[in-house]
Image (cartoon, grey):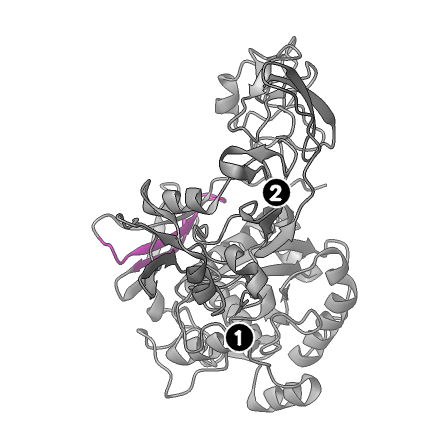
Amino acid sequence: MDYLFISDDCFYHGFIQGEPSSLITLSSCLGGLRGLLQIGNKTYGIEPFLPSATFQHVVYRVEQKKGGIHLSCGLTAEEQSHQEAMIGKAKYAKPKHSEGNWWTHARYIEVAIVVEHQLYNRFGRNQTFIAVRVLEIIHIANTFYKPLGVHISLAGIEIWSEKNLIEIADYMVPLLINFNTWRKNELNQHLPSDAGHLFVYKRFGRTVGLAYTGKICNPHWASAVESYLGYSIPFFAVLFAHELGHNLGMGHDTENCHCERKSCIMAPFPGEVDQFSNCSYKDYFRLRNSACLLTPPDPEKLFKFKFCGNKIVEDGEQCDCGSALQCKSDPCCQTDCKLRSGATCNIGLCCAHCQHLPAGTVCRKKVSSCDLPEYCNGTSPLCPEDVFVQDGAPCKGGAHCYRGRCTTHTRQCKTIFGKRARVAANSCFRLMNVRGDRFGNCGWKDGIYKKCNPNNILCGRIQCSNVYKLPSLMEDSTIIQTSVGSTECWGTDYHGGKEIPDVGAVRDGTPCGAEMMCISGECVNFGLPSFQTRAPGHFSVLYITCWKHLETISMVETL
């Protein structure tokens, strides 16, 4: 059996010192360096020179190593017409919240890769080698898509190591149909993704790839096929990026399409190029607000290599100290991912000197009046899950606890605009949060900003007054100042898809009325816990249910 073993730190992005416009994409997983070096308007490929006892490498200009007109994409005008007749044209997702806004905030694509049996044999039946090759291709393609604000994630790899699960037809069109049918009925059940691509080792004349166009968020049609016949990694990464571009609605470049290279990624005849054309940008922006592209992938569901030595404790392991060199200095864990003799643990807030800390030891201190401390149980190295005082319990300033936090509009204003800031008048909230744009809304979903109804205006975007200090916000952030009569209103914007926290959305748990608090942009009623109260100097027992654990504890305080 072939056990996957991939180093967890062999993929790199960087730049050349002294060249601010440079970009480097490299991998060193299989020995030597493979990838691209972009310096100004020039791009170079780098690969190991094999065989070489002195670790020599070949560096070449990418534009000087084109695929040539003998290789082409199978999406001809005839095939495109056939697709449109069969599944319809791409339905463009209009950005209702920002018509005409071309700012490239992040979009996310989760791709599933299937490697057919002949390609598996071609790579020496070595699953590790295949997995590294796939990751190198995704890694380089990510560089191409970075200017578009697109992040490609690998949902998973399926390798047909025993036999092909579909008929590998002699022509690309029926092969794509076969693969897409199987993906729809089988692959999506255990490996869902935004797009599925099949890598095959077979010659189809001049055709090296084919995809369904503009169906990126359609689980029934977002498929593509690429022929891998020993091409260089940079070339195949371009081919993969090209076919994925078709999934995203990009057509082939025409004579009116340009980039800073002699040829661009969506040219009908793929070559080792590294830029999308103006036409590709235009096509992409018609589909960029498709629902599946707006949600970042769940890190827990992305493709991961599980192996002893990756410093992650996985099934069957007692510990994982990393490489042999790292394990030498670990007093608790061995290179086989088992604990050393006498050790009961090696990591965790409840582990010290390779032993569990005694039960009752505080492992996570209370950080606010709405929080509770956590204690070691004496048998686990891990600190128990964070628990909080019950939602709705009273806290400072007439507020109520929510998810361990005590927050108000004014506290949020102080966080953004400084200690002198205060919550603005309700008229500011009424003015701004009914707009349904990036400056005033009650949330954002599927590319659309939601207008606040009158009951929820205090739960949209924060509005502040008494502002004497403007904060230093992240790039692409805007502070807006408006007036309602003599009242000044200060707030911030937020573009959906940005990869930074939204500091200007009213926080969940903020009071918005008597026994009311903001939750997900809505002002909702909550039930207060029953508290026993007595005269000053007496004791009161507060029965509070911890959030998450649903356990009742008693707290004795002097009133």
For the point 75% across and 56% down, the residue is 190
Residue range corresponding to the magenta coloring: 19-38
Find residue 95 and report its horizontal and vertical position in percent. 50, 74
Find residue 535 and report its horizontal and vertical position in percent. 62, 19
> In this orientation, does residue 126 appear?
no
Tell me if residue 36 is in the magenta stretch. yes
Which element is circle 1 on?
helix
Position of the C terminus, as image quadrant, is top right
Sooner in the amino-acid sequence: mark 2 or mark 1: 1
Left or right: residue 463 versus residue 349 is left
Position of the N terminus, as image quadrant, is top right
For the point 49% across and 45% down, the residue is 30
For the point 67% across and 35% down, the residue is 547
Left or right: residue 462 versus residue 165 is left
Which numbered tag is attached to residue 305? 2
The kind of residue on which mark 1 rests is Leu
Q: Quadrant of residue 444?
A: bottom right
Q: Could you give the CA–CA distance between mark 2 and mark 1, rounded to whole angstroms?
A: 32 Å
Which numbered tag is attached to residue 541? none
- Viewer-side residue, 424 vs 519: 424
- Viewer-side residue, 553 vs 175: 553
Q: Quadrant of residue 3?
A: top right
Tell me if residue 33 is in the magenta stretch. yes
> In this orientation, does residue 9 appear?
yes
Residue reaching furthest to the front: 535
Q: Which of marks 2 and 1 is in front?
A: 1
Residue under numbered circle 1:
287
Find residue 432 and report its horizontal and vertical position in percent. 44, 65
Q: Quadrant of residue 405?
A: top right
The kind of residue on which mark 2 rests is Phe
Residue reaching furthest to the left: 18
Q: Residues within 10 Å of mark 2 (few under 14, many from 20)?
A: some
